[in-house]
Amino acid sequence: MQPDYERNYLQMNARDRVAFRFLLFVVNIMAYDDETKKALECFLTWDILEDAMPFLTQPPGIYAVGGREASYSTLDNVVRYDPTTNIWSTVASMPSKRDYHGVCVHHNYIYAVGGKDNSYNYNYLDSVVRYDSTTNIWSTVASMPTKRANHGVCVHDNFIYAVGGHDGRNALDSVLRYDMTTNIWSTVASMPSNRSHHGVCVHDNYIYAVGGNDGFTTLDSVIRYDTTTDIWSTVASMPIKRESHGVV
């Protein structure tokens, strides 16, 4: 039977595991009992490589992925800034042009999710492409079930969330989740209201959707998604309404 302390440990997210192991490392130094040391070391070595990967293999530098230039042409170009040399350089371009898309990082991969292309009809996209920073190669992964742009994208654990956005007709309340292990998109609980041009961020087990536009008006409202219960709730509104802003 698996001990309770192991089950509790496995239920922690990656950040909590790292912090917990560091604390146990300090305690282990002061432990005199061999049996206690052995139990502590179980935690210190458990799944250590898996938990350390996000912190060790994030793509180095700052990447600007696609977007629109001054002439309003949509770009497939990707550039990388090296903070140590203060130099920008060009890396491999995306397979297709896109702007108003979402971008996120997981391990050594950069994902570009949805957006719009540069076609005559300015199509909304459901496609998702992935850049491997170790090989400088883009590849295509599973498309979203629905097209969207001006949406929020974030990573929690081994999932990418595409939150709200616009499909060319309406602002959306739907939320999609991509499993990076299985390459499958699924639908999770919708937001209480439609919103696009909003900001999205993650804190602990919560995803926050901040401000934006519901298709008619700019919003000051803020809502929060609990990844453990699949439930959205409302938190305090901002003092000022805003959209197309940044959130960290």
Image: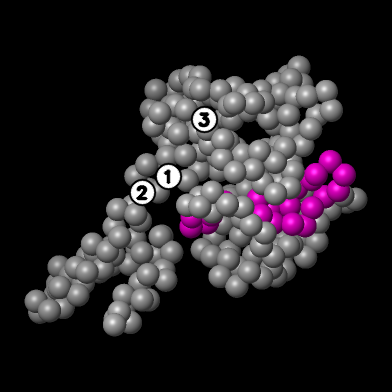
For the N terminus, the image quarter is bottom left
Mark 3 lies on a secondary structure that is strand
**Up-down: is 95 above or below 25?**
above
Residue 20 covered by magenta stretch: no
Compare marks 1 and 3 and give the one earlier in the sequence.
1
**Up-down: is 158 above or below 231?**
above
The residue range painted magenta reads: 155-176
Q: How is the image coloured?
A: one colour
**Up-down: is 151 above or below 80?**
below
What amino acid type is highlighted by mark number 1? His
Seen as rendered, the residue at the extreme top is: 71
Read off the residue under disc 2: 53
Q: Identify the disc placed on residue 138.
A: 3
Q: Residue at x 84, y 41 (%)?
A: 168
Residue 146 makes an appearance in the image: yes
Q: Nearer the viewer, residue 164 or 220?
A: 164
What amino acid type is highlighted by mark number 2? Met
Q: CA distance from mark 1 to mark 3?
A: 15 Å
* Left or right of residue 140: residue 15: left
The x and y percentages for residue 109 are 47, 39
Read off the residue under disc 1: 107
Mark 2 touches mark 1? (CB < 8 Å): yes
The x and y percentages for residue 108 are 42, 39
Q: Classify 10 Å Cα crowding around label 2: few (below 14), some (14-19), many (20 and above).
A: some
Q: Could you say which quadrant of the image residue 39 lies in?
A: bottom left
Q: Could you say which quadrant of the image residue 64 lies in?
A: top right
